[in-house]
Image: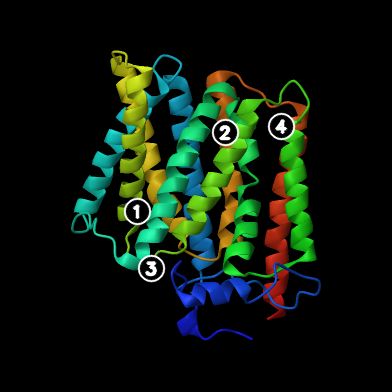
Amino acid sequence: MRLPASTCRVTPDSISFRILLMRTPLMSPIRRVRPASIRVQPLQPGDNLKGATVMVLSMIAFTCNDTVIKFVTQDMPLYQAITLRGVFVMMALMLLAARSGGLRLRIATPARWPMALRLVGEVGSTLLFLNALQRMAIGDLTAVMQSLPLVVMLGAALIFGETLGWRRMMAVGLGMAGVLIILRPGSGTFGIWSLVALGAMVMVALRDLATRQFAQDVSSTTIAFYAAACVTLIGLVFSLGQGWVMPQPRHLLLLLLGSAFLTVGYVSAVAAMRIGEISAVAPFRYTSLLAAVLLGYVVFGEVPDLWTWLGSGLVVGAGIYTIWREAQLERRH
């Protein structure tokens, strides 16, 4: 039975949220309809293409920022770099918001729980990811993160009640197998930072799923500003224990450049998860792998090994299959 539109608004404290959790099983052996990929607003023509384009922009921007941070933190403490970059990002977001009437920092009560969950995911993913980035090749770390669309898809099923057919469940399994091949548990390449990378992936999935719960009246710039402010504050607190060094002019210029990339990434990441369907938009995160491999080679001389390429192929292949499967189901209707 399909719920009426009035019950499809999902908030953590609403009865409809509990109804939606029980509405449909995680896996259906015979799948006749394409998944709902819960949307607060009706899907408009072209939304999936717009969302995919914004997602590609977001991934390239984030990867460029990651490259800048990895380079700068060779000479500067990590949390000092996070704090300085965060200040620059907040200034950029305020300038962007000024063009549309300024920041509206007041959050309505229904959006407070999603905001809290999103900030937990944002801070957790940033700290875990950047710590792993200092110690792992950027291509290897990005390859691990490529399983994120599958994790988000699984999370949408568990939280939003979207039914997954057995084929998509197999795709998730293959994607996770690809991650294991990249990390190779039991080998000399597997260590604590591999687990940190997995933790970062889970936190990003939490952030993205929480983003879907904001109504359209909460602007992407406001959401991004709260994220930047929270990360900057946590970075400042941690930097007090790590210590500061006198930044060189080139470091400040690089951090300014990184903040510009991160600002674009913040805003476009929020927008991408609010346009189109999760299952159609999220797989375009894979473009970050190409950017990471290229930048890792050019800037750091890093070349992924055969196992990383094999695992990445499984992860990306699983994601591409889910896109193809969605197209097949859409043509039936």
Task: Specify which label sits upstream in the sequence, 1 or 4.
Answer: 4
Q: Amino acid at mark 4?
A: Leu
The residue identified by callout 2 is: 292
Question: Residue at image x 32%, y 48%?
Answer: 226
The disc label shown at residue 183, or none: 4
In this view of the protein, can residue 227 be seen by the observer? Answer: yes
Q: Say few, some or many: other residues with alpha carbon within 10 Å of mark 3 (under 14 / 14 to 19 / 20 or more).
A: some
149 vs 205, nearest the viewer: 205
Circle 2 SS class: helix
Q: Amino acid at mark 2?
A: Ala
Q: Amino acid at mark 1?
A: Ile
The residue identified by callout 1 is: 223
Task: Specify which label sits upstream in the sequence, 4 or 2.
Answer: 4
The disc label shown at residue 274, or none: none
Circle 4 SS class: helix
Of labels 2 and 1, the one closer to you: 1
Task: Specify which label sits upstream in the sequence, 3 or 1.
Answer: 3
Q: Is residue 75 above or below residue 239?
A: above
The disc label shown at residue 215, or none: 3
- In the visual, does 222 lie left or right of 41? left
- In the visual, does 238 lie left or right of 322? left
